[in-house]
Image: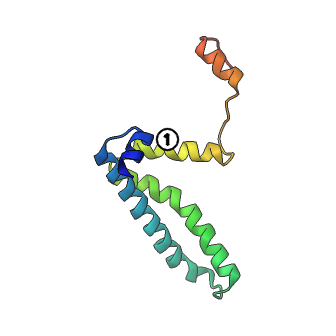
């Protein structure tokens, strides 16, 4: 499994371990932080509570990943990772194939 990730991400074995540690710590922190924020909202533990909890974890996670990636020395990896994830989700600027061809040819693109 580690070798597959190492090859896929193009990083060393040590960096794979550091990236996985960053994912684990940031994910755990996101859940912990969301649990600490939930009492402020004073919601009963029903469907709305869990929906809000999931949304909070989802919003906290990218920030936590960036913070912990600095701690683990993996900021450059996660900057690219979250950028690619944002593009897949429809956020960020998408480049057309025409734009890519023009950039490769050295043409100026507006």
Q: Quadrant of residue 100?
A: top right
Q: Is residue 7 above or below residue 29?
A: above
Which residue is depicted at the point 43% across and 58% down?
23
Please identify the quarter of the rendering in which residue 67 is found.
Answer: bottom left
Residue at (44, 69) in percent of width and height: 28
* Left/right of residue 17 with respect to residue 95 in the rendered view: left
Mark 1 Cα within 10 Å, few/some/many (few <14, many 20+)? few
In the image, residue 76 sits, relative to residue 28, either above or below, namely: above
Residue at the extreme bottom = 44
Q: Is residue 101 above or below residue 29?
A: above
Image coordinates of residue 70 in percent, x first then y, are: 37, 50
Q: Residue furthest left?
A: 14
Secondary element type, mark 1: helix
74 is higher (above) or lower (below) than 107:
below
Given residues 73 and 7, the one toward you in this image is: 7
Q: Which residue is mark 1?
A: 80
Q: Is residue 65 left or right of residue 49?
A: left
- Percent across and percent down for residue 110 are 70, 21
Q: Nearer the viewer, residue 48 or 41?
A: 48
Residue 26 picture location, percent across and down? 43, 62
Residue 106 x/y as whole percent: 59, 11
């Amino acid at each position: 499994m580690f070798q597959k990730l190492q090859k896929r991400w193009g990083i060393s074995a040590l960096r794979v371990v550091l990236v996985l540690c960053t994912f684990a710590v940031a994910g755990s922190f996101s859940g912990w932080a969301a649990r600490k924020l939930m009492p402020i909202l004073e919601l009963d533990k029903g469907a709305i509570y869990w929906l809000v909890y999931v949304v909070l974890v989802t919003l906290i996670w990218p920030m936590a990943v960036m913070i912990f990636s600095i701690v683990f020395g993996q900021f450059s990896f996660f900057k690219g990772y979250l950028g690619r994830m944002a593009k897949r989700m429809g956020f960020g600027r998408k480049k057309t194939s025409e734009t890519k061809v023009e950039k490769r040819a050295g043409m100026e693109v507006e």
